Amino acid sequence: MALPNNFDLDQFVTLVLEEDLGTGGDVTSNATIDANARFTADMNCRQPIMVAGLEIAVAFFKRLDPAVKVEQLLHDGETAGVRTTLLRLEGNARAMLAAERSALNTFQHLSGIATLTRQYVDAISGTGAILLDTRKTIPGLRPLEKYAARMGGAQNHRMRLDDGVLIKDNHVAVCGGVAEAVRRAKAANTGLQVQVEVDRAEQIEPALAAGADRLLLDNMPLHVLREAVALVAGRVPLEASGGVTLETIREIAETGVNFISVGRITQSAPAVDIGLDYLTI
């Protein structure tokens, strides 16, 4: 997996299992299932999906039963149709059932992000525009959610506040204007490109004159986006953002912007329908 270098999968699995198992463990399975009972199951799709987080799901089962046998049939970044079997597990029944919900919750959430992301990517296919994610993520899950967005075909925008300069409307308001905000950012010599948000065409030239390396065109109607693309004429990359939906993204891409950022692919993606189905062998 191409997870970020600073993401600790072992720690993530530990924290999630501690949240679900508590201090007493899976009391239901322990009370009803023999300690040596075996469990064989398929993880199956119940809708078409983009796969993201399958290896992470496997890590939960391996944590509770290191001897579990796993046959993984698909990998992250691949598509799966209805009734597709993603993997088969054979292991200790108590351990498999205790890990099931943590594994499914994680996998369903990440595949939901990848699946919605792919729908947006497909909607702008052929336009030349690139889909970006945002920092609108669930606290603590950003590395995984941005990973899922990559699996769906998007590119990652900033991971954190320290890896990119993005001057937003409130920065502009405090500084007294777009040009002054950009001037201060350039003078800080961070070594990073300076991107600034503009919401009116008349802000574009002052931003460029002050040295902006990239513009974020925020909540602009289509005719203003076209005006902005013509005005900039390729001098810096342009990113459109704000209220983008599956119904509107194609028209936005066709204005000629280079990037389109969509917060809802991480913020509002529904979990996909995946089940762990017991097999009688």
Image (cartoon, grey):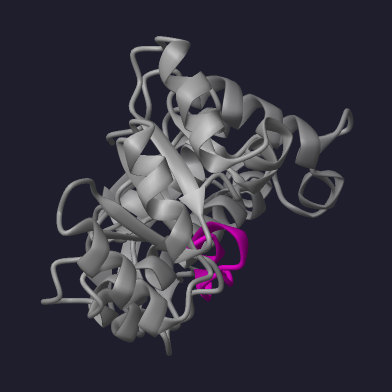
Viewed as shown, does residue 14 lie left or right of 7? right
The residue closer to the viewer here, 68 or 48, is: 48
Answer above or below: position of 128 versus 145: below
Q: Is residue 147 visible?
A: no
Q: Is residue 116 visible?
A: yes
Q: Quadrant of the C terminus?
A: bottom left
Answer above or below: position of 109 versus 58: below
Determine the residue located farthest toward the top in the rendered image. Answer: 189
- Horizontal and vertical percent for residue 30? 79, 44
The residue closer to the viewer here, 161 or 202, is: 202
Q: Quadrant of the N terminus?
A: top left
Determine the residue located farthest toward the bottom in the rendered image. Answer: 247
Answer above or below: position of 183 versus 221: above
Count of numbered circles on the image: 0
Viewed as shown, does residue 274 lie left or right of 225? right
* Magenta stretch encompasses residue 271: yes
* Magenta stretch encompasses residue 153: no
Residue at screen point 36% across, 73% down: 225
Residue at screen point 40% across, 9% down: 189
Extent of the magenta region: 262-276
- Horizontal and vertical percent for residue 131? 31, 61
- Horizontal and vertical percent for residue 137? 60, 48
The residue closer to the viewer here, 228 or 95, is: 228
- Horizontal and vertical percent for residue 185? 48, 22
Residue 201, quarter of picture: bottom left
Residue 227, quarter of picture: bottom left
Viewed as shown, does residue 89 lie left or right of 142? left
Residue at screen point 63% across, 47% down: 169
Residue 24, quarter of picture: top right
Residue at screen point 52% across, 20% down: 184
